[in-house]
């Protein structure tokens, strides 16, 4: 794989990940662009011990443009996009409308004695999986999935070195039902200046388990699921895809390596090669459930940069809000208000349907 770093017209970084070593990337960005916006505000919620990002400039971000105006397609002579090249394999670049960035403005005072405000230090990147606007991740060949995984590993390691970054989160949203604003197949990476609430909760549970048993909680749960078997959807030598016994979403699958590793960079070549075929198989099963493209979120759970890395176990959480061919799951009062999920589909039934799809 050939890695080429360049700059866009406004100074943002763009990185090509090419599958051929002889590719030359010297196309300049010929657009005239305003400077990137300053970092957002982070406001501390003392009632939940959580940070909220306030990024007002994101109101102006591109929203569902037609295909001939897609900013993630390759550039043409008559239309310049975010990618200057006329074709590409995988590209990563700094988001033009980031929730977090390294461009720090003056730090404002807190709004109350209890609500600290600080700059939204970090970084947000866009990952384009292919230059084919009409493709989807499920259409990629396994070797392209490997290229994507290598790019995520590269960016996870690089972003972890940035000042103030505490956690790197890679994810993909698919489908307007989920809330995507660009149809082109792509994902995103957020480098957070704090450990996210969900990860803190998972690590606290893992810490209690380690103190009580000496084991890794996720690894022990994975072993139990593999032994039970009734919620396993698919597996190979290095990975298992299973529906969690307490799945929150109608269709939710975890893909986990059998070897406990903290993050994507820690995966071996064999583990990276084995991921693509299994993931593509699960995605095809998702689409086959109702014979239509399944809206989903694919979220990589990685260890924090500096703390509790030994407690974590890398895994990909894939879930959909579609609960039937003609029904979506909307978060109700108990779920949005109290965080108590009520599942519409039994996990065992979901696993059976996915195996049969």
Image: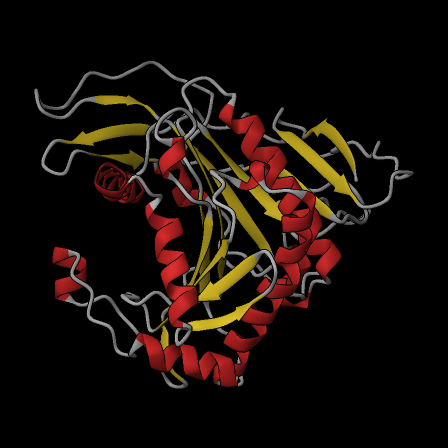
Residue 145 on image: x %, y %: 67, 55
Using residue 304 as the reference point, say whether residue 187 is left or right of it. right
Location of residue 267 with respect to 49 vertically, above or below? below
**78 or 194, nearer to the observer:** 194
Q: Residue at x 58, y 74 (%)?
A: 284
Residue 70: image x %, image y %? 63, 54
Residue positioned 27% across, 65% down in the render: 246
> Measured from the top left, where is residue 221 in percent x and y?
35, 56
Q: What residue is rendered at 59% in x and 42% in y?
A: 267
Indicate left or right for 174 with 212 as reference: right
Q: Quadrant of residue 339?
A: bottom left
User: Number of labelled discs?
Assistant: 0
**Res 72 visible:** no
Instruction: State the scheme by which the image is colored.
Output: secondary structure
Of residue 242 and residue 53, the one placed in the foreground of this image is 242
Q: Residue at x 30, y 35 (%)?
A: 53
Farthest residue, direction front: 213
- Is residue 343 among the parts visible in the rendering? yes
Residue 205: which quarter of the image? top left
Task: Name the outermost residue toward the right.
Answer: 22
| Image-based side of 144 in relation to 199, left or right | right
Quadrant (top left, top right, bottom left, bottom right) of the N terminus: top right
Question: In the image, is residue 273 above or below residue 66?
Answer: above
């Amino acid at each position: 794989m050939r890695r080429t770093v360049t700059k866009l017209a406004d100074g943002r970084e763009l990185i090509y990940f090419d599958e051929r070593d002889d590719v030359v990337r010297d196309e300049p960005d010929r657009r005239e662009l305003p400077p990137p916006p300053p970092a957002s505000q982070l406001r501390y919620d003392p009632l939940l011990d959580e940070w909220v990002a306030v990024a007002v400039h994101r109101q102006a971000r591109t929203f569902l443009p037609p295909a001939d105006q897609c900013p993630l397609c390759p550039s043409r002579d008559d239309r310049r996009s975010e990618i200057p090249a006329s074709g590409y394999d995988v590209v990563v670049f700094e988001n033009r409308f980031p929730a977090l960035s390294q461009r720090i403005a003056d730090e404002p005072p807190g709004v109350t004695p209890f609500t600290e405000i600080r700059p939204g230090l970090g970084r947000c990147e866009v990952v384009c999986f292919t230059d084919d606007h009409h493709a989807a991740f499920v259409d990629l060949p396994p070797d392209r999935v490997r290229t994507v995984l290598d790019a995520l590993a590269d960016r996870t390691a690089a972003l972890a070195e940035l000042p103030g970054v505490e956690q790197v989160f890679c994810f993909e949203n698919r489908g307007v039902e989920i809330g995507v604003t660009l149809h082109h197949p792509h994902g995103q990476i957020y480098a957070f200046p704090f450990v996210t609430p969900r990860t803190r909760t998972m690590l606290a549970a893992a810490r209690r388990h380690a103190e009580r048993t000496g084991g890794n909680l996720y690894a022990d749960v994975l072993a139990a699921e593999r032994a039970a078997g009734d919620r396993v959807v698919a597996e190979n030598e290095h990975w298992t895809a299973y529906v969690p016994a307490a799945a929150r979403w109608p269709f939710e699958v975890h893909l986990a390596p059998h070897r406990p590793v903290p993050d994507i960079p820690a995966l071996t070549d064999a583990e990276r090669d084995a991921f693509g075929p299994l993931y593509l198989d699960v995605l095809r099963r998702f689409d086959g459930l109702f014979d239509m493209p399944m809206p989903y979120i694919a979220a990589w759970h990685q260890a924090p940069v500096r703390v509790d890395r030994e407690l974590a176990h890398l895994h990909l959480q894939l879930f959909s809000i579609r609960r039937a061919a003609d029904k979506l799951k909307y978060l109700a009062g108990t779920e949005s208000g109290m965080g108590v999920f009520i599942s519409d589909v039994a996990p065992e039934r979901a696993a059976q349907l996915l195996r049969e799809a």
